Image (cartoon, rainbow, N blue to C red):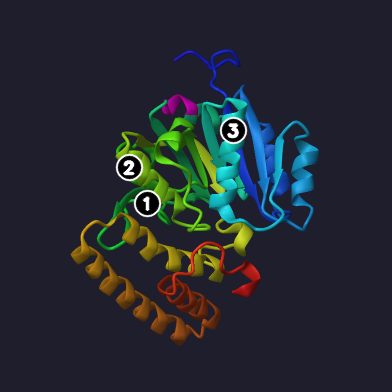
């Protein structure tokens, strides 16, 4: 395949939603500046940061499109504002990139070569602190139990994770290349999620409209798990929104009342078992976050309901 030149390479809008990322934003900016893809434009959306991180982005990329929201609007709303800016710039693709990732120089070139106007492409995302472990999900989704499947998340990188995979049902928008036409066809991200599971919902809608999802392992990035919400595999903030949003996601797409009833039994039973384990560990913050997630879903409280400091 011929190398991509600025004349041949489609314009990519690199969308990052920023929230108090001072601990890692300079590394993100440095690795973004070092990529070899010749035709991209940064679109940075700030969700009410107060730590100088957005100013650091503006200093490093003075020609970027900078959007200040004034408050923490969450990933879904921030990403939607970035998509609108990318459309206005005439971009062919949106690249969603969390700013708690470190990028490799050729990751975007590899993604663009793997994508097309009907194909979303996601890279191999490895854990920042241990490059031998897969950090986030790309694979299938069980719409009866509401669980990811065959994603390799948390497993060691190896031969199985080094092969291109097509026909996927879900992947993380921690880093994902999406043809902007998909947003015209499938609509924007659902802002009622605020964050977590909004990408699974969007991908489902895009797939139903004839788009495809591809995992491209030659494209590699490194991810700090939950960098903006406390760090680590699971935080109270992530526990709350993942718990609350999961039944909302399944209810939104599950057309069988019987299957949704079975999901509800499974979901509440699993949460009860998880609560018992948390109580044994005396992990009261995580237990409270999970309980609030269940309660708020059944109260119909969607969108932004809890902040990091609330949990």
Mark 3 lies on a secondary structure that is helix
Residue 94 position (above or below residue 136): above
Which residue is under mark 1? 152
Q: Which mark is residue 273?
A: none
Residue 280 percent location from the top left of the image: 44, 86
What is the secondary structure assignment of the residue under circle 2? loop
On the rendered structure, is 183 left or right of 268? right
Residue closest to the eye, 256 or 100: 256
SS at mark 1?
Answer: loop
Front of the two marks 1 and 3 = 3
> Which of the two marks, 3 or 2, is nearer to us in this view?
3
Q: Which residue is mark 2?
A: 168
Res. 39 image quadrant? top right
Q: Who's the residue at 24% across and 69% down the image?
A: 261
Quarter of the image with the N terminus is: top left
Distance, label 3 to label 2, CA atoms, is 25 Å
Mark sitting earlier along the chain (1/3)? 3
Q: Which residue is mark 3?
A: 86
| Distance Cα–Cα, label 1 vs label 3 | 31 Å
Task: Looking at the picture, tell me which residue is in the foreground, 37 or 247.
Answer: 247
Q: Nearer the viewer, mark 1 or mark 2?
A: 2
Q: Residue furthest left?
A: 258
Residue drawn at point x = 41 percent, y = 46 percent: 202
Q: Which residues are magenta?
A: 112-116
Q: Main secondary structure of the magenta part?
A: helix
**Drawn side of residue 53 relative to residue 128, left or right:** right
Alpha carbons under labels 1 and 2: distance apart? 13 Å
């Amino acid at each position: 395949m011929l190398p991509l030149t600025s004349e041949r390479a489609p314009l990519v809008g690199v969308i990052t939603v920023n929230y108090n990322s001072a601990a890692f934003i300079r590394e993100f900016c440095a690795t973004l500046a070092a990529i070899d893809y010749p035709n991209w434009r940064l679109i940075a959306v700030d969700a009410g940061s107060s730590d100088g991180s957005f100013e650091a982005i503006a200093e490093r990329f003075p020609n970027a499109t900078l959007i200040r929201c004034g408050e923490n609007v969450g990933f879904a709303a921030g990403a939607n504002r970035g998509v609108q800016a990318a459309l206005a710039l005439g971009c062919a693709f949106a690249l969603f990139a969390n700013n708690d990732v470190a990028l490799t120089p050729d990751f975007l070139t590899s993604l663009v070569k793997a994508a097309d106007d009907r194909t979303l492409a996601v890279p191999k995302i490895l854990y920042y602190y241990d490059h031998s472990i897969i950090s986030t999900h790309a694979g299938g989704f069980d719409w009866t139990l509401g669980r990811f499947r065959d994603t390799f998340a948390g497993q060691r990188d190896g031969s199985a994770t080094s092969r291109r995979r097509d026909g996927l049902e879900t992947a993380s928008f921690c880093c994902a290349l999406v043809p902007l036409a998909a947003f015209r066809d499938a609509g924007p991200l659902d802002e009622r999620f605020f964050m977590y599971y909004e990408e699974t919902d969007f991908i489902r809608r895009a797939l139903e409209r004839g788009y495809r999802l591809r995992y491209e392992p030659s494209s590699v990035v490194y991810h700090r798990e939950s960098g903006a919400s406390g760090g680590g595999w699971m935080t109270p903030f992530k526990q709350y929104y993942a718990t609350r949003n999961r039944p909302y996601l399944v209810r939104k797409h599950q057309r069988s009342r019987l299957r949704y009833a079975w999901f509800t039994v499974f979901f509440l039973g699993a949460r009860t078992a998880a609560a018992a384990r948390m109580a044994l560990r005396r992990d009261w913050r995580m237990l409270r976050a999970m309980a609030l997630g269940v309660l708020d879903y059944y109260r119909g409280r969607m969108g932004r309901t809890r902040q990091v400091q609330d949990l």
